[in-house]
Amino acid sequence: MFTSIEFGNYQSFERLFLDMQQKGQPKPLIAIYGENGAGKSNIVSAFMNLALSLRTYQNQLDLGQVDRQAPGIMTLREDDQLAGSLRQNGDYQRTDTILDVFENCYMLAATAPLRLSYQFVIDGHKGSYELIFKKDHGAVYLAAETLKYLINTTTGILFNITKATAVSAPVFKFSPRLFQNSNVTRTFKDSVQRLWGKHTLLALFYTFSKESNATYISDNIAKNFLTVFNEMLQLSFKTDQGISQPTFQKLLSGNLYNGLLLHNAQEQAKLANTELALNKYFIPLYSDILSLKYRTESINNTQLRYVLYESKRIEGKVIDIPFVLESHGTKQLLALFPLLLSAQAGGTVVIDELDAGIHDLLINRIVENISEDLQGQLIFTTHDTQLMREIAPSSLYVIRSDADGRKRVEPLPSIAKIKANNNVQKLYLEGYFDGIPYTEDVDFDDILNEINEARLF
């Protein structure tokens, strides 16, 4: 889907252009390398924030309902993987306005606009989505939102909305093709006047689509706009701040470890389908896992409690244990499962530290298998150089930094010529492509001596 992304004054990047296309088409696999602190997570956060920005207005409405039901208590909706907050270091970060989503994203000390531009190709047609934030007397505000995509036979502006200052009224331009009904046009003009700036137009449309039936939407909204919007809804992510798991109609959504379901045939079928899929995923990767199975218990004949168990070979015995007791790395593989399925099914998935907590050989096998026939797009950061043996050099990217801290992200073939018989992993570790830490020895004895000799007064 994405062919490039461009930053201006976003987090640690004053300027950045990440080109993810080959011969005009999105690369299905992107692996981003770089030393710690280079900005890999910042790149992932730009995709995460795009996904979160689509749901801010709906989150605000949902959280308002929660507040009315139990004032002072904030909970996450179980039916929406992108609910109104992200868990971060034990606290909840609210994501019910666009400014909440992009909080602390403005590059420190920057006065020029914060700009993010996402370029994409859908159904063979190019498009772009751009957000611009500015400062007004130190206060950050949303200054512009623009979507460009196919109109009739050429690419044009589907909509453009701007604000001159934090308190001024938005000025907007809708393509005559965007809305097919004057009532819908009036509805969105009114919504933009009242709510834009706290929410994007895409976020306002998300709530509109939730409140309208599918026929009304298809009859009154431009097909090309719906194509872009639905493609963006398929964007999923996994970071330290949170995870957006895609949903599959025939599988469990949400918590795969345990939970409650409606006690009916359809939900039980989803449970069985998920169990089968997890067996096909884990058993080839683990020699000691023999099977996975959901145990169920009926609750008041209306709900079904489910818990995931695994049959595991331990000390010559086969023991059934709750999956929640598994190692951190194995739990990470379970968290990756729906994301990898989504990428395989045609969605766009962005993951920070794909290999975190997972054995090199396991993650190598997974990447090797999924890259064979990837239908969607998988973008991830990693420190696992073993993966360089499995991925084409054109899909391997490195964040490079010059002596003044200016950064750029480039695919390996753009940095240096690579021959067919080159060991790319070895070249990278030797600094041939940059993007590695250059360190000196740390004298821990000297540190301890300084501490012991230090005075407290």
Image: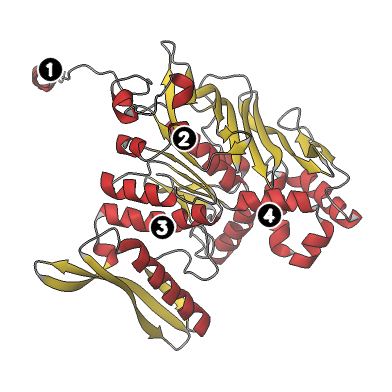
Give the residue type that dot 1 points to: Glu
First along the sequence among labels 3 and 4:
4
CA gap, disc 3 to disc 2? 22 Å
Foreground label between 3 and 1: 3
**Image marks 3 and 2: residues in contact by CB distance under 8 Å:** no
Q: Return the residue at label 1.
A: 450
- Identified at 32% across, 46% down, the residue is 364
First along the sequence among labels 3 and 1:
3
CA gap, disc 3 to disc 4? 26 Å
Give the residue type that dot 3 points to: Phe
Q: Residue furthest right?
A: 182
Give the position of the C terminus as an image quadrant: top left
**Left or right, 231 with reference to 215:** left
First along the sequence among labels 2 and 4:
4
Residue 137 placed where, x, y %?
65, 23
Q: Return the residue at label 2.
A: 395
Taking depth in this image into account, of 395 and 175 the one nearest to the observer is 395
Q: Residue 206: which numbered mark, if any?
A: 4
Q: Return the residue at label 3.
A: 337
- Identified at 39% across, 85% down, the residue is 298
- Identified at 28% across, 52% down, the residue is 329
**Left or right, 16 with reference to 191:** left
Taking depth in this image into account, of 301 and 68 the one nearest to the observer is 301
For the rendered model, the colour scheme is: secondary structure
First along the sequence among labels 3 and 2:
3
Residue 19 placed where, x, y %?
56, 30
First along the sequence among labels 4 and 1:
4
CA gap, disc 2 to disc 4? 33 Å
Give the residue type that dot 4 points to: Tyr
Q: In which quarter of the image is residue 281?
A: bottom left
Residue 390 placed where, x, y %?
36, 40
